[in-house]
Image (spheres, grey):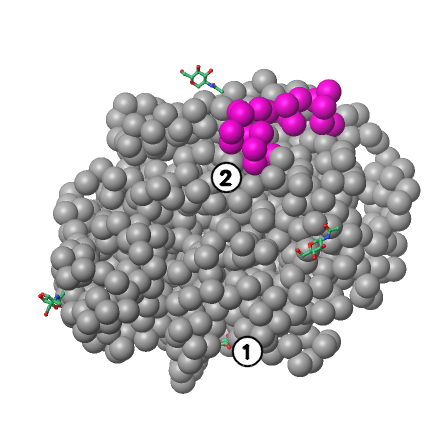
């Protein structure tokens, strides 16, 4: 049993986190450069970063708010690496022993390392997660495999040794804001001195978007928390008019979506905090309400949500992506304005679950601390659109948001704990899961049961919500195998005994009441009681050599054999395929909305035994999935969850060829579609870049691989006049690069 549980943990751990951030080249050949270069030069700062009058900022923030300056880069070696090593060791030891790994060490990294500059994905402390590192001739593939071997096999962290590697991208000044006023003070200070700002909630970024040298870094871990006292039941607001200060606006939106309650979540909270608040609300039994969130407890709702939000463990297929759950946002904009905004008018929309947003209104906080009309003109529609799906870290600092809550449904954990060694068994399981995700009637289940089930990158377990849904899945599985009895026997070469065992393999477990209970860190240890999270930090490895390609649901249904053969040889992510929960004013790509399953492909597709070669896949199958006919409009098809620095789109000159891993980073960035464009597609990215120019004309926020960051490519080389730009931090919870490593470590016992 522990082995199944362990299997599940892996799932949980590697799951849903994620953020990611965007990349470096979408725009370099486009039209932005002249304009933004000029603006950037105009704001070049006068003083060196280390000579800034930091005491002026100290005087403006809360007296107990900490501002560290002059943090040396060596802090990464003295403070972060030991924590990472311990985590690797603990993970390796516990997984050898067969016990649940994951002591919660990433909470240590996030919460207990004094400087606030550690990164969950260790190599993302280096510029562009190590891809820009010293050896310019090395190919990206070589860089990835070297760091993999060093970190994982030899525990060799010499790449972080300053004498070997001067490529740190760490801020030397870190503010730990405790409230929105501190953030306003920091932004105004940055504005006055033309500084760049970077932001970190959890530091899970796979693209280094939450760290950046020579920025004023805001580490949000000391920020006040709201969720434990921030749950509001909305029924009283049913007939109320919308208040001008938007105080009841979150409930008005929730009610318009038939949701009973909302939760107020602060910038620095993590999913472990929020799930605990929701679970413990009101009744001693808890579990009155349910939040859709990430799978890894240390991930922050902020970064997770702003890059889309895959709810594989929390009913996201049924209720919508993370972006669809936000009903109000509170931010500090690059202008220094402290704003609160959300939909104030909407209409029912055919074919959509939630109403279409027709108007977004906002208010500003004045010096007396009162919310009222804004003096400046702010385009709240654009902000609402861009922030929800356009990634954290680039639009300003989100200090809080309100999320809608659902009624809690019964929780079932379905697992296939038998070993699936033959390809006949493997394919049967995949075929069943493909049907469960995109065509449930083919296995005798209804749409609603199907939507209740999902998972992160795990085939052989599903978290299902709804009365009796787990049992229904188990029953459907049995009849599925009974139906294939003769085929599995005659063509698959399985004995009847094997087939009978296989038919009994699925188990539905409803012993725990919710996801949090399933994956709580056991005592002892300082993080006992929190939700499990990433178990190890693997650096520039697995995720960086992969692309997260969203397979359209329609394509999967029409091409089930192809889908099965692809997924039989790869990991895949099961948080897609639900009804359209868009409010039609957000940035989540059409690929996400129309997705069936996210396929996790290595570039050359070699490590796994797919029955299609890379060339056929990219040149024949992908063009069946996405429209490549308009050469001015690349159709985004990559998932943003876990997208990493090394993920780029295909060749600019030929979309049917993946970006070679045996090129250098410089060559790849020059010749391949940027990560941003590969996620959003050309049109959506252009619109976002336009909004970025308006909201943040001086690029105070300029995080690596974030929207607008590509424009950095066209900046002047002259570092003296080049300004407060470079790269900065995205907010967020990006998750860990853990996945591939875990997958490979666990291959021996994983069901697939
Ligand atoms: C891991 O643990 C083993 C056994 O306790 C120890 O010998 C080794 O030095 C540790 N490695 C690291 C990198 O901490
Ligand atoms: C498969 O068929 C064999 C032979 O008829 C039978 O003994 C066995 O119980 C069947 N198994 C399943 C799962 O249907
Ligand atoms: C869902 O709605 C959005 C509009 O926000 C649209 O772009 C997308 O194509 C729709 N997707 C599906 C699968 O209906
Ligand atoms: C790079 O990889 C491609 C595809 O695998 C291969 O055809 C090519 O020969 C490689 N180039 C070099 C320089 O190794």
Residue 170: numbered disc: none
Q: Residues within 10 Å of mark 2 (few under 14, many from 20)?
A: many
Q: Is mark 2 within 8 Å of ligand 1?
A: no
Residue 242, image x and y in percent?
Answer: 42, 68
Residue drawn at the location 34% of the way across and 52% of the way down:
752
Horizontally, is 36 left or right of 304 in the view? Answer: right
Q: Position of residue 137 (x, y in %)?
A: 78, 40
Q: Is residue 21 left or right of residue 481?
A: right
Front residue of 110/148: it is: 148
Examine the image and state in which quarter residue 362 appears: bottom right
Look at mark 2 in the image and give the residue it sits on: 202
Q: Quadrant of the N terminus?
A: top left
Look at discs 2 and 1 and give the one toward the viewer.
Answer: 1
The answer to if 691 sits in the magenta stretch is no
* Disc number placed over residue 624 in the picture, else none: 1
Q: Is residue 46 above or below residue 393?
A: above
The structure residue drawn at horizontal position 21% and vertical position 66%, both measured from the top left corner, is: 489
The span from disc 2 to disc 1 (Cα, nearest Å) is: 38 Å
In-front residue for pair 326/608: 608
**Residue 635 visible in the displayed image:** yes
Q: Is residue 261 visible?
A: no
> What range of the chain is rendered magenta?
147-166
Question: Based on the displayed image, in which of its 4 quarters is residue 478 positioned?
Answer: bottom left
Q: Earlier in the sequence, mark 2 or mark 1?
A: 2
Location of residue 599 in the rendering, given as x and y in whole percent from the top left corner: 47, 61
Q: Quadrant of residue 521?
A: top left
Q: Is residue 648 above or below residue 89?
A: below
């Amino acid at each position: 049993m522990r082995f199944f549980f362990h299997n599940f943990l892996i799932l949980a751990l590697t799951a849903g986190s994620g953020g990611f951030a965007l990349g470096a080249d979408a725009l370099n050949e486009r039209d932005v450069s002249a304009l933004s270069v000029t603006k950037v030069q105009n704001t070049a700062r006068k003083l060196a970063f280390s000579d800034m009058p930091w005491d002026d900022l100290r005087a403006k923030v809360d007296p107990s708010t900490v501002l560290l300056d002059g943090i040396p880069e060596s802090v990464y070696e003295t403070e972060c690496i030991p924590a990472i090593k311990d985590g690797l060791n603990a993970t390796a030891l516990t997984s050898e022993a067969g016990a649940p790994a994951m002591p919660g060490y990433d909470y240590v990294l996030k919460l207990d390392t004094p400087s606030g500059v550690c990164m969950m994905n260790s190599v993302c402390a280096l510029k562009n997660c190590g891809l820009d590192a010293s050896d310019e001739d090395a190919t990206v593939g070589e860089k990835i495999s070297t760091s993999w071997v060093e970190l994982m096999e030899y525990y060799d962290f010499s790449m972080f040794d300053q004498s070997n590697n001067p490529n740190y991208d760490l801020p030397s000044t870190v503010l730990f804001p405790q409230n929105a006023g501190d953030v306003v003070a920091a932004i105004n200070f940055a504005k006055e001195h033309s500084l760049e700002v970077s932001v970190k909630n959890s530091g899970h970024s796979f693209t280094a978007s939450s760290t950046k040298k020579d920025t004023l870094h805001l580490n949000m871990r000391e920020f006040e928390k709201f969720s434990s006292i921030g749950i509001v039941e909305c029924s009283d607001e049913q007939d109320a008019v919308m208040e001008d200060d938007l105080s009841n606006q979150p409930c008005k939106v929730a009610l318009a979506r038939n949701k009973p309650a909302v939760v107020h979540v602060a910038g620095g909270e993590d999913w472990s905090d929020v799930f605990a608040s929701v679970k413990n609300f009101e009744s001693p039994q808890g579990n009155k309400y349910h939040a859709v969130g990430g799978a890894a407890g240390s991930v922050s709702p902020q970064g997770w949500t702003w890059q889309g939000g895959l709810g594989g463990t929390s009913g996201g297929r049924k209720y919508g992506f993370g972006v669809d759950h936000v009903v109000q946002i509170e931010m500090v904009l690059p202008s220094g304005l402290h704003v609160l905004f959300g939909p104030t008018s909407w209409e029912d929309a055919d074919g959509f679950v939630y109403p279409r947003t027709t108007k977004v209104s906002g208010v500003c906080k004045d010096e007396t601390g009162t919310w009222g009309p804004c003096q400046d003109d702010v385009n709240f529609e654009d902000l609402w659109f861009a922030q929800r799906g356009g990634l954290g870290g680039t639009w300003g600092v989100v200090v809080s948001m309100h999320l809608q809550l659902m009624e809690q449904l019964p929780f079932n954990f379905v697992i296939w704990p038998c070993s699936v060694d033959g390809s006949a068994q493997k394919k049967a399981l995949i075929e069943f899961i493909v049907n469960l995700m995109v065509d449930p009637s083919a296995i005798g289940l209804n749409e609603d049961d199907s939507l209740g089930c999902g998972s992160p990158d795990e085939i052989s377990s599903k978290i299902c919500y709804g009365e009796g849904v787990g049992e229904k899945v188990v029953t459907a599985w049995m009849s599925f195998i009974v139906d294939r009895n003769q085929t599995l026997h005659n063509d698959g070469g399985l004995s009847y005994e094997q087939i009978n065992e296989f038919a009994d393999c699925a188990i539905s477990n409803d012993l725990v009441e919710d996801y949090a209970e399933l994956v709580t860190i056991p005592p002892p240890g300082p993080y006992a009681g929190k939700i499990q999270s990433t178990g190890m930090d693997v650096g520039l490895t697995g995720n960086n050599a992969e692309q997260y390609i969203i397979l359209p649901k329609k394509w999967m249904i029409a091409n089930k054999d192809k889908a099965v053969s692809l997924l039989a040889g790869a990991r895949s992510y099961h948080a897609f395929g639900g009804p359209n929960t868009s409010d039609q004013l957000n940035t989540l790509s059409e690929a996400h909305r129309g997705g069936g399953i996210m396929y996790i492909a290595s570039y050359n597709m070699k490590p796994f035994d797919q029955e299609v070669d890379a060339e056929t896949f990219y040149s024949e199958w992908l063009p069946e999935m996405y429209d490549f006919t308009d050469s001015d409009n690349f159709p985004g098809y990559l998932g943003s969850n876990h997208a990493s620095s090394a993920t780029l789109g295909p060749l600019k000159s030929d979309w049917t060829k993946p970006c070679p891993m045996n090129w250098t980073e410089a060559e790849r960035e020059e010749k391949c579609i940027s990560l941003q464009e590969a996620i959003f597609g050309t049109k959506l990215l252009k619109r976002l870049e336009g909004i970025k120019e308006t909201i943040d004309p001086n690029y105070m926020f300029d995080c690596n691989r974030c929207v607008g960051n590509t424009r950095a490519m066209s900046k002047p080389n002259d570092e003296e006049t080049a300004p407060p730009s470079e790269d900065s931090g995205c907010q967020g919870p990006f998750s860990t690069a853990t996945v591939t490593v875990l997958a490979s470590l666990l291959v021996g016992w994983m069901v697939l």
